[in-house]
Amino acid sequence: MKRVRFVFLLLLLLCTAAGSSISTPKQANPPNFIFILTDDQGWSSTSIGMDDRIPASKSDFFETPSMDRLAREGMRFTNAYAPAAICSPTRRSILFGQTPARLGDETFPDTHDPRSNLPLLTIPAVLKSIDPGYRAAHFGKWDLRADIFPEDLGFDESDGDTGNAHGNLMTGKDDKWEAVFLTNDPKRSASITRRGINFMERQVRAGNPFFLQLSHYAAHVDMQTREATLEKYRNKPKGTKHHHPAWAGMLEDMDATIGQVLDKVASLGISENTYILLMADNGSVEMLPPVPSRQKLQHPDSFDRPLRNAPLRAGKWTLYEGGIRVPFIVKGPGVPAGSTCRESVGGWDILPTLATLAGYRGQLPDNLDGGSFAGLLQSEGIGEVRRTNDFLVFHRYSDGYPHSALIQGDYKLIRFWKTGNLELYHLPTDLGETNDLNAAQPGKAEELDKKLHAYLQEVNPQLLKKLTAY
């Protein structure tokens, strides 16, 4: 049972935010949206690569023909960021259009409890406020970790309050980085996709515009793959940074289901009115098995072999580029095939972008961190994303090594709260974050650090109080 009447609450919220009554004309043919969210997939893990200027942005072992096809038919974003370096805060952020710092971590279940009858702005809710005919479904990994179901937040169909365990096959913690399972439905990618395709077919027959989110359990341990795929990679020459046959098989098996979605969109005759977005929830683990926590923040030169996210630094669990820069591709009406966008975008930009593409022309609430990149899709990737703030902020909730990052223009600042250390990088010339400029440019570091503190004070003063108490 739905516990919140999303359409009426959202209409009230949006009208209030704009300061006047808003009328959004209903489009004759509202667009459909398919959002594919992969798990633990590094920026350099596709076979096409996210940046043609950087050969190492593609994998030296993995094969992702369907993602490559999507990129050839749409737009690649070279500087796309997952909202967080781990899964749950990313999923919350995308859904609500706000940064994990604003949403909170321990406080999130209370502040976003749908039983509180507070208006909650989410992707399906905003689409339904534009056109009540929209239907929304979420299949696969939900993992908000807040006792909230997809139906509580505007979805009409779902797999429920699922997490990693729902995609696993009896892996224990002691062997999850070594165990390999052979199955005909690796990480449930095929069954998730079948349910998604069934949903699409029903909505097209009924004439309903739709939002479909397919949140894959792959590529995340435990490792599952088809026998034939595993055998293929066992017989393939290994790469330098990527060389694990089971992980490669798991990724390709998931990739095949993305091809099924592309084929179904074409066969249903809705390609000209459907946007398809693909993003990863965070970067890949830096090694298999991962290095101990105390080593995750070490300089890349301290390791005796390339990390799995190379040329990016580190990986999942950290706010270095390897943890948050991810594959992001968009295909849809008016999006030039084979195009590239080099503007920075974040996962919290997706909500306002879909709202714009669906025809919303009002003012979204000021507490959104995201801005619409719809204009980039129609202009060969040229332009800018207008947000409340002209920077991106990330925060890693971790008692062991809490740290935050701010990216503005070409510069990135990372603050480590327990040590007080600041690191400053110029990303265009140092994508691997190997040359800390803090000592050479203390003024720039201080400028960005002040902006970071001011943002945290504005959106989550309790968090900042805790961080500055270390």
Image (tube, rainbow, N blue to C red):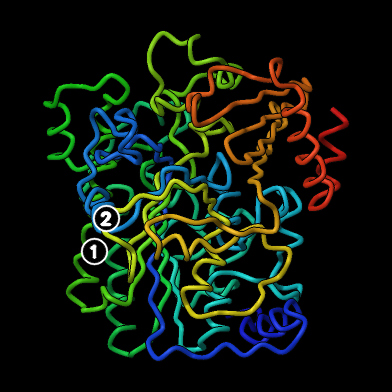
Labelled disc at residue 262: 1
In the image, 71 versus 448, the foreground residue is 448
Helix, strand or loop status at disc 1: helix
- Crowding at mark 1 (Cα within 10 Å: few <14, some 14-19, many 20+): some
Q: Residue at x 51, y 45 (%)?
A: 81
Image height check: is 443 above or below 28?
Answer: above
Q: Which quarter of the picture shows residue 266? A: bottom left
In the image, 177 versus 441, the foreground residue is 441
Q: Nearer the viewer, mark 2 or mark 1?
A: 2
Q: Which quarter of the picture shows residue 393? A: top right
- Residue occupied by mark 2: 70
Task: Indicate the amino acid at tag 2.
Answer: Leu
Q: Residue at x 50, y 80 (%)?
A: 359
Q: Position of residue 218 (x, y in %)?
A: 36, 46
Q: Is residue 159 left or right of residue 103?
A: left
Q: Is residue 224 left or right of residue 466?
A: left
Look at the image and tell me in which quarter the N terminus lies: bottom right
Q: Is residue 313 visible?
A: no
Q: Position of residue 287 (x, y in %)?
A: 42, 23
The disc, 2 or 1, on the residue closer to the chain's N-terminal end is 2
Contact (CB < 8 A) between labels 2 and 1? Answer: yes
Q: Residue at x 67, y 30 (%)?
A: 414
Look at the image and tell me in which quarter the C terminus lies: top right
